[in-house]
Amino acid sequence: MRPIFSRILKSYFAPELDLRVKLFNILAVGGMITSLIMAALSAYRHLGLINTISCLAIAVLSFGLLIYCKRRGRYQICYMITIFTIFMIMFPIIFFYTGGYYSGMPLFFVFAIVFTFFMLEGRRAIVFAILEMITYLSVIMIAYHYPQLVHHFSSEEDLLFDLIFSLVVVSLILGI
């Protein structure tokens, strides 16, 4: 088991890899692990089938992008797929199914914007970060004006757990 783990670490996080490549690999691995945990917790805490499926979809997409990028080396395409599919589509869906702005999802919104700046360069980074901000601000305003669209946590304990989990995960991934 240890040689396989060492080989994976060397392959995806080797010192000679470009910083953006390593950051993307961290994002993909962190996204897989976090999404799988969240899918399991979502199913266990009965947070809804759509939320569970969304988390599983992010895990599968993250894994697929990680493998595709390693084999093909087309990181820019993977960055864009991540930004559009995960950050701008899946995150807003999960936002509505996990308590809206009464959840840890706004932390993931900040996380997404920060990673967009890490993955892209120059004007492209600015343009996509602004698009994400507009998306997230719109989602928050929709949740405010149409609270019936938000599936709230069934207990204060579930909300507290979500906030703590989100804070720890976002902090760890950004810290790494």
Image (spheres, rainbow, N blue to C red):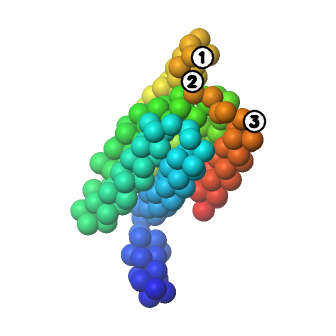
The residue at which mark 1 appears reads as 147
**Quick check: can you spot residue 115?**
no
**Quick check: can you spot residue 82?**
yes
- Residue at x-position 67% and y-position 50%: 165
- Mark 1 or 3, nearer chain start: 1
Q: Nearer the viewer, mark 1 or mark 3?
A: 3
- Decide: few, some or many residues near mark 3? Use Cα within 10 Å; few <14, some 14-19, many ≥20: few
The residue at which mark 2 appears reads as 150
- Residue at x-position 43% and y-position 42%: 54
Q: Report helix, strand or loop for mark 3.
A: helix
Could you tell me the amino acid type at mark 2? Val
The residue at which mark 3 appears reads as 156
Residue placed furthest toward the bottom: 3
Asked if marks 3 and 2 touch (Cβ < 8 Å), the reply is no
Could you tell me the amino acid type at mark 3? Glu
Residue 101 as seen in the image, left or right of residue 55? right
Could you tell me the amino acid type at mark 1? Pro
